[in-house]
Image: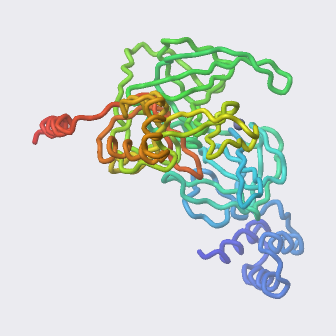
């Protein structure tokens, strides 16, 4: 059945089968071709004209479980399970993007909206007309575009069946829908905040399983350090460039009596793409040392890196010397920027900032000499680095290195051999 036949069938049904399909087809063509009326409006008008109730039209309405990638026109009724916003600057214009999860009795789907005519809140039931879907992490995502109409429905107009997928920490990705994890609370801090005048308890911390760690926020659900929990119905958001697990009393939380081993396995850079990661371990080779590495000068007030004794914010200052390294690490699956701080740079070079100042002076004030020393030490050298990896739209992946170690090439060869042996080679 093509689109036109579907519309005719829709009108036919709305009219209770009392009008011939040929008559409907003629009417529809007339309204669309001659009067240039948009199809949805044309259908309503035809049903009214022929004595029916336009509200009986089904249109393109679908259930969430029926949605596939790449659908051009989607109407649906859904409940807002979660909604967040994020600000972007595009060509100097600030834009707000909304994102979250919608649900109905058949399942859930992540959505994004570049514009919302009405303010939506968690729990609202909505009717969405003329949205579309696109691929996101291999699954459909609903996009509320500029031609989409969103209107509020009465509360409880939509019942939600939550489809919750069990995941490992390493698999968590912002906006993936509701998830279930079995993980151990590694650290937690309690605080009180006021939201819309209501005091609420917030528990912030770190949770981990045998694949990795992730920061979490629990609203109003007390959790204790050392607890191993099955958390069913949490969601993942992006916070400060890293994924974060969020849950509240609507999640089902049960203590689990198993010994959870927090493993430290290296992750691939590819797996961090577009989401970042908390305290992750990556092994790779430094392939480039970027400009801005070596001896640098900072504003003593704000820490900004300066190229003269003028800070854009603090005016004339006496710049403070510092050292850092911005290097590109490649692991074969992707590349990311690694930032080493002063202490780490001193360790890599085996010199202090004072030594660096003296070396630069001895080389007629040329600071490039330090960067060259870094290149000599790092380029093509295999390393293991650990730290938070931030995913920022403009800059890609950046790791703020917490720990590092140089890897022995022989070690790597041995390890590879061991792995092959394990695989029975
Ligand atoms: Zn400053």
Q: Position of residue 413 (x, y in %)?
A: 17, 40
Instruction: State how the image is colored.
Output: rainbow
* Residue sticking out furthest to the left: 425
- For residue 107, side relative to residue 186 (left or right): right
* Residue sticking out furthest to the bottom: 34
Q: Could you say which quadrant of the image residue 268 lies in?
A: top left
- For residue 335, side relative to residue 85 (left or right): left
Residue 124 vs 11, above or below: the answer is: above
Residue in the picture at 64% in, 34% down = 303
User: Can the viewer see residue 197?
Assistant: yes
Q: Quadrant of the N terminus?
A: bottom right
Residue 157 vs 279, above or below: the answer is: below
Q: Position of residue 267 (x, y in %)?
A: 38, 38
**Residue nearer the viewer, 112 or 306:** 306
**Residue nearer the viewer, 30 or 18:** 30
Tell how many labels. Answer: 0
**Residue nearer the viewer, 125 or 274:** 274
User: Can the viewer see residue 166?
Assistant: no
**Residue nearer the viewer, 164 or 174:** 174
Residue in the picture at 34% in, 35% down = 384
Q: Could you say which quadrant of the image residue 189 lies in?
A: top right
């Amino acid at each position: 059945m093509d689109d036109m036949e579907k519309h005719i069938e829709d009108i036919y049904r709305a009219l209770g089968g009392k009008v011939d399909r040929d008559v409907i087809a003629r009417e529809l063509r007339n309204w669309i071709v001659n009067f240039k009326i948009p199809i949805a409006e044309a259908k309503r008008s035809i049903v009214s004209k022929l004595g029916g109730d336009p509200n009986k039209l089904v249109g393109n309405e679908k259930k969430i479980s029926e949605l596939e990638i790449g659908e051009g026109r989607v109407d649906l009724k859904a409940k807002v399970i979660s909604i967040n916003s994020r600000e972007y600057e595009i060509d100097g214009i600030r834009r707000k993007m909304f994102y979250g999860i919608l649900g109905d009795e058949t399942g859930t789907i992540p959505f994004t909206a570049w514009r919302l005519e009405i303010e939506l809140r968690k729990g609202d039931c909505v009717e969405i007309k003329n949205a579309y879907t696109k691929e996101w992490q291999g699954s459909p995502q609903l996009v509320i575009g500029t031609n989409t109409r969103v209107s509020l429905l009465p509360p409880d107009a939509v019942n939600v069946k939550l489809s919750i997928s069990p995941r490992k920490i390493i698999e968590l990705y912002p906006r993936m829908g509701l998830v279930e994890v079995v993980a151990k609370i590694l650290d937690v801090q309690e605080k009180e905040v006021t939201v819309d005048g209501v005091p609420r308890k917030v528990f912030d911390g770190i949770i981990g399983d045998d694949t990795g760690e992730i920061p979490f926020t629990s609203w109003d659900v007390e959790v204790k350090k050392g607890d191993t929990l099955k958390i069913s119905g949490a969601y993942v958001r992006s916070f400060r460039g890293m994924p974060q697990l969020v849950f509240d009393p609507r999640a089902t939380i049960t203590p689990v009596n198993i010994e959870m081993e927090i493993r430290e396995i290296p992750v691939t850079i590819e797996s961090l793409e577009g989401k970042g990661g908390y305290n992750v371990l990556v092994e790779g080779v430094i392939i480039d040392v970027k400009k801005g590495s070596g001896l640098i000068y900072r504003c003593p007030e704000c820490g900004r890196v300066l190229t003269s004794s003028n800070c854009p914010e603090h005016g004339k200052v006496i710049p403070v010397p510092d050292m850092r390294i911005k290097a590109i690490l490649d692991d074969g699956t992707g590349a990311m920027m690694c930032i080493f701080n002063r202490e780490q740079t001193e360790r890599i070079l085996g010199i202090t900032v004072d030594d660096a100042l003296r070396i630069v002076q001895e080389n007629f004030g040329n600071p490039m000499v330090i960067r060259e020393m870094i290149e000599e030490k790092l380029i093509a050298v295999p390393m293991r680095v650990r730290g938070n990896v931030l995913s920022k739209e403009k800059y890609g992946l950046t790791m703020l290195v917490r720990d590092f170690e140089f890897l022995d090439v022989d070690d790597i060869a041995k390890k590879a051999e061991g792995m092959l042996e394990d695989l029975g080679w």
